[in-house]
Image (cartoon, rainbow, N blue to C red):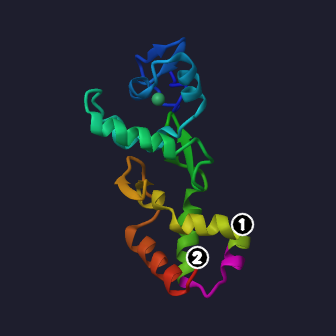
Amino acid sequence: MTCEKCGHVQEKPREKFGTTLCTLCYHLSPSEESQFKEYIQEKVDGSTLETFRKHFHPGEKQKQGMVKKAIKGHPMSRMPFGYNLENGNLVPAQNFKEVEEIFEEFINEKISLKKLSERHHLSINGLKKILRNFTYIGKIKFNNQIYEGEHEPLVSTTLFNHVQNKLENEGIK
Ligand SMILES: [Zn+2]
C-alpha cells in the first residue's frame, strides 16, 4: 500500500481519517481533522525522508522535529534531472549518465553555461541547479544541513567538488 502523503510503499500501512499513511507520516500527522487534510495535501518527496525512516522511533521528540522540518522544506517537486521516483525512493533514470557528462563537460571543456545548457536542452538556471545539487553525490540537503541519503550517487565527490570550485572561481552565482 502506498502512503498518500509521501508515496512510500509499506506492507502494513497505518490509516487515519480514511487515509493510508506510512508509519512515519502517520506519527507526524496532526490529530485534528481539518489540519490533517491540509497535511495530506502537502505532498512530500518520500526520498527525502528515507534517511530518517530507518532510524525513526515515534518516541524521539528531537528527531520528529527534524523530520517535520524536512517535510516542510521538501514539498513534492520535480525529480532532480537523472532520477526517477519509485516507491518513494530516488532511482537513476534512463538518462542518468547525462548527469556525469554534464559535470565532466563543464570541467573539461571551455564551454559557456549557455552553450552547455543548450547542448543538454536545459535552461541556464536548470543547469546551474544541476551543477550545485548535492543529490548527485548521494546526499540530501535541507535547512542548510547536509545529510547522507539512501539513494545512488550519479557523480563522484571529487568531480562534484571540482565543479563547485570552478563555479566559485568563475564567479557563477
Ligand atoms: Zn509517508
Which residue is the site of mark 2? 173
Q: Along the line of sight, which residue is nearer the eye, 55 or 100?
A: 55
The kind of secondary structure element at disc 2 is loop
Q: Is residue 23 left or right of residue 122?
A: left
Residue closer to the observer: 3 or 142: 142
Q: Is residue 135 visible?
A: yes
Where in the figure is residue 15, as x and y percent of width and height? 47, 14
Give x and y (percent) for residue 149: 38, 50
The magenta-colored residue range is 108-116
Magenta residue check for 19: no
Q: Is residue 47 above or below residue 154?
A: above
In this rendering, does residue 55 appear at all?
no
Q: Reply yes or no: does residue 112 show up in magenta.
A: yes
Which residue is depicted at the point 53% across and 12% down?
17
* Residue that carries the numbered disc 1 in the rendered image: 123
Q: Position of residue 41 (x, y in %)?
A: 61, 29
Residue at x 61% of width, y 45% of height: 77
Q: Does the beta carbon of the residue at mark 2 sit less than 8 Å from ligand 1?
A: no
- Residue 98 is drawn in which quadrant? bottom right
Q: Is residue 155 above or below residue 6?
A: below
Question: What residue is drawn where x is 58% and y is 64%?
Answer: 129
Three-letter code, disc 2: Lys
Residue 61 shown left or right of residue 94 in the figure: left
Q: Secondary structure at mark 1?
A: loop
